[in-house]
Image: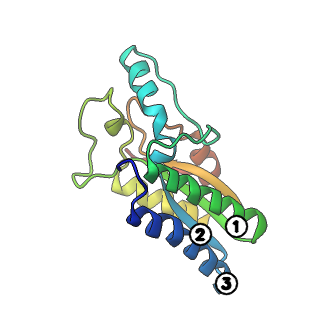
Amino acid sequence: MGRAVNDEILHNNIIGTYTVFEAAKRAGVEQVIFASSNHAVGSYEEEYVSKAASGQREMLDHLVLMQPDSYYGVSKVFGEAMGAYYANHRGLRVICIRIGWINPDNKPEGDPAEPSPAMWMSYEDFAQIVQKSIEADTVQFDIFYGVSDNQNRLFDLEHAKEILKFEPSN
């Protein structure tokens, strides 16, 4: 992502995110599903890789402190914070999905000890978590991880299973 905030991140992920939340509020929309990213907590990856290499499996839950790994990650943290503000003070219901890694082949690839395969999400599981989020009409604000039930998974799915009834098939 580079060392400086580029115009694309500023326009799309900062100004654009504010614009979407504000437009939703003004239009009377009741719920926004925000496409966040694993990059909101991406600084944990190095620690994850070293622990996985030594056989330890530690997962991050939805309450972990945000640790962005780039300006892109910072912009996703901004979106989550904007969602919390609109949920707590402007009356929207907001669900943030920290999307892992969806690839064109629709299968995890690479070394299982590395983050990418552990963060993989199938097309089917992504469609399911979005659908379950849309149907979650009692959730005011929450954050869920968008990954499949992968070997060496970094992100905890128990919260999504409990609140959304998410049942990853992969």
Q: Is residue 121 visible?
A: yes
Note whether 53 is above or below 19 in the view shown: above
**Residue 164 at x, y percent in the picture:** 60, 54
Q: Which mark is residue 26?
A: 3
- Residue found at x 44% / y 53%: 72
Residue furthest right in the image = 89
Locate residue 126: give its quadrant: bottom left
CA neighbours of label 2 inside 10 A, class few (<14), some (14 to 19), many (20+) = many
* Residue type, label 2: Val
Q: What kind of colouring is applied to the model shown?
A: rainbow
Between discs 3 and 2, the one toward the N terminus: 3
Kindly state the secondary structure of the residue where label 1 is placed: helix
| Residue 33, x across and y down, in percent | 55, 65
Q: Which residue is mark 1?
A: 86
Mark identifier at residue 51: none
Q: Position of residue 76 (x, y in %)?
A: 51, 55
Q: Are discs 2 and 1 less than 8 Å apart at CB?
A: yes
Which SS class for mark 3?
helix
Identify the residue position indicated by label 2 in the image.
32
The mark tally for this picture is: 3
- Which residue corresponds to the image point at 63% horizontal and 71% vertical from the top-left? 31
Asked whether, in this view, residue 27 is left or right of residue 40, the answer is: right
**Comparing labels 3 and 2, the label whose residue is closer to the camera:** 3
Picture coordinates of residue 90, whole percent (x, y): 75, 71
Q: Amino acid at mark 3?
A: Arg
Which numbered disc, 2 or 1, marks the residue that appears first in the sequence? 2
